[in-house]
Image (cartoon, rainbow, N blue to C red):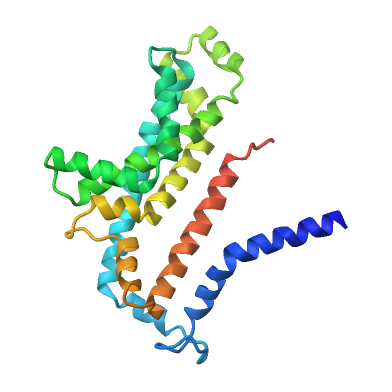
Amino acid sequence: MNTFIKTVYAALVYAFLYFPLVVMGVYSFNASKYSIAWKGFSTTWYLKLLGNTQLLDAALHSLTIAFFSATLATVVGAIAALALHRYRFPGRKILYGFVYVLIMSPDIIMGISLLVLFLVIALPLGFWTLLLSHITLCLPFVTVTILSRLQEFDSHVIEAARDLGASEFRLFRHVILPMVMPSVLAGWLLSFTLSLDDVMISFFTTGPSYEILPLKIYSMVRLGVKPEVNALCVIMISITLLAVPTAQWLLKDKTR
């Protein structure tokens, strides 16, 4: 009986979380354009979406920002995690705490602070400000992901490699990097998803010359939910649902 109650409770929680997404997915195939009444199954809105150049350009911009911000954040985050784990230096604990401060900071605070910074240094809002902002958003998540993997290391492996004459570069290349590669890939996928879905920080740090997909969808929804928006959201959710489980799978310990 206790197991049954837990199962029902979990099912209700997941239904509450995912039922709106299911409804949106169903109505993305609704033939009706101006009402929520079901008028039959249709893929018209997906076909029209392919012909909407503004949405496609915004999608391309989002994918570009997500790819480069995830890649750069992964490189910098891996170096930061390695430095925090292997070396002892003044201010290490403070730096370690700042990583979690960035994770817990509200997006609106981060967006406004970055906007003020860009205005102070007179950097025009556009691609570069958006890229730097998304790197700042993703960096702490990558650092924590890789750092958690490093903390599971058996230190004797590194000591054995040093005893065998491995240099710092060979130690990193042949011992540390293969062991943290799953977490590196997971951090990249997580960063890609965070960048692709971000609205609040992007709202403050991008300019009119570089429009991205989340902000485009936000502006379209303010005028009413169109079927094309439903179709586009289904595609974005599908990408997210593919990336997040893949990241979780990569983080699992694999045993031969």
Image vertical order of residue 236 relative to residue 150, above or below: below
Q: Give how far across and how far down residue 120 sits, in percent.
A: 14, 38
Furthest-bottom residue in view?
Answer: 39
Above or below 148: residue 56: below
Q: Is residue 100 left or right of residue 211?
A: right
Up-down: is 115 above or below 47? above
- State which quadrant residue 135 falls in: top left
Residue at image point 19% right, 52% down? 126
Q: Which of 204 and 242 is in front in this view?
A: 204
Residue 251 vs residue 111: left or right?
Answer: right
Q: Which of 158 and 53 is in front in this view?
A: 53
Residue drawn at (58%, 62%), measured in percent from left and top?
Answer: 17
* Quadrant location, the C terminus: top right
Closer to the camera, 32 or 242? 32
Q: Position of residue 20 (x, y in %)?
A: 54, 70
Question: In the figure, is residue 143 to the left or right of 8?
Answer: left
Instruction: Report whether residue 243 is seen.
Output: yes
**Residue at x 41% of width, y 18% of height:** 92
Outermost residue to the right: 1
Question: Can residue 179 be seen in the rendering of this structure?
Answer: no
Which residue is pictured at 47% across the width and 13% down the height?
Answer: 166
In-image side of 30 versus 98 (left or right):
right
Q: From what the image shows, is residue 121 above or below residue 85? A: below
Of the 4 image quadrants, the one containing the N terminus is bottom right
Measured as percent of width and height from the top left, residue 206 is found at 23, 53
Across and down, in percent, residue 230 comes to 43, 74
